[in-house]
Image (cartoon, rainbow, N blue to C red):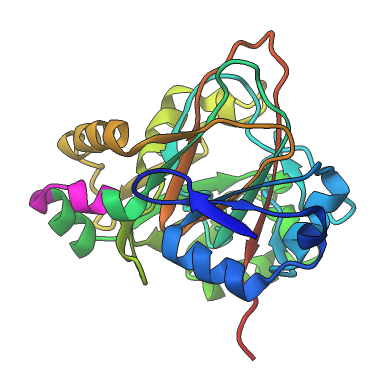
Amino acid sequence: MRVNALFNDFGKIIELSSQEYLSVNTNRFKEIFNNHGVLLIRGTKVDRDLFEKFTGHFSSDFIVHSAKVRKRLSKDQTVQTVTEGYGPIVLHSEMAYSPFSPEVIWFYCETPAPVGGETTVGDGVQFYRKLSPRAQKLLMSQKLKYVNIWAPDRWLTHFPSESPDEVIQKMTQLGTQAHWINSETLYFEYLRSGITKSARGLAFANGISIHRQYEKEVNTFQESHDKQVRHGIFLENGDKIPEWLCNELTEIEEKVTQKVSWQNSDIVMIDNLTVLHGRCAFDPALQRSILLRMANWPKAA
């Protein structure tokens, strides 16, 4: 295992031999990961099978992204495609809007776009430090309220055999306020801090900016026939996210964004609690194939 700097201020490149992909020193990996937030792993030819085996060294608690636009490619359905399309996607924490948000994400590059299409990352710890005192005070004093309207394809992913009453009971246990709009449509509100406490310090990690993008580009994130706005974000007290805060976040995002220039077989491992990610635009005529897998760390016995 060889370790080098990824960016000047955070992240590491891990170079592995082919054998090291199959016999991962997970303790050493997690130590580096916890200290640096994002790892770019390369060194040998990787296919889907090896990607699945490699990520399986770290956890068995994998999460399926329930959005229908994410194709499920592995037998257990946890290796999936990323958001379809070719436009840019702003920095965000994956699935921060729900209690099913993962702690760690792996991206795997099958085919890089020859030009553009980089995955972007931003250190949430640096992001928080660049927030104005006014913004820090607001986000530390109020959680974010995520509002969701889920069709059956979303909630059945997580509750395939539960009765309607059992779904509400389990969603309540997960910290949401949920009810049925009708026999098929689940409404829930989820409170979550926009700031994460971590070993590296306080980190800005949430979905404010991507919810703003979603409201403008619904069909980037949903099937083309589904025009309904199914997600919203507010302050804990129900107020809209202030425009001055959104403008500030846009300015900071431009300062902290780094680009991961993909090579075939690359794997990028991201701490979803402290590192934001997104995507650069690319020409739709170009082929690009990036897959992902998401998980929570194994719970201590």
Viewer-nearest residue: 69 or 26? 26
- The vertical placement of 274 against 67, above or below, is below
Q: Is residue 133 magenta?
A: yes
Q: Residue at x 76, y 53 (%)?
A: 78
- The vertical placement of 66 against 167, above or below, is above
- The vertical placement of 78 against 113, above or below, is below
> Range of the magenta residues?
127-134
Asked if residue 19 shows in the view, the reply is yes
Viewer-nearest residue: 270 or 24? 24
In the image: residue 24, left or right of residue 233: right
Q: Residue at x 67, y 49 (%)?
A: 65
**Screen quadrant of the C terminus:** bottom right
Name, please, the residue furthest toward the bottom: 301
The picture places residue 128, in percent across and down from the top left corner, at 25, 53
Q: Residue at x 61, y 75 (%)?
A: 27
Q: Is residue 105 magenta?
A: no
Report how many numbered discs are placed on residues in the image.
0
Please identify the dominant SS of the magenta region. helix
Q: Residue at x 55, y 56 (%)?
A: 3
Name, please, the residue furthest toward the top: 285
Name, please, the residue furthest toward the front: 2
Asked if residue 102 shows in the view, the reply is no
In the image: residue 141, left or right of residue 18: left
The picture places residue 278, in percent across and down from the top left corner, at 49, 36
In the image: residue 41, left or right of residue 12: right
Viewer-nearest residue: 22 or 203? 22
The picture places residue 43, in percent across and down from the top left corner, at 71, 46
**Screen quadrant of the N terminus:** bottom right
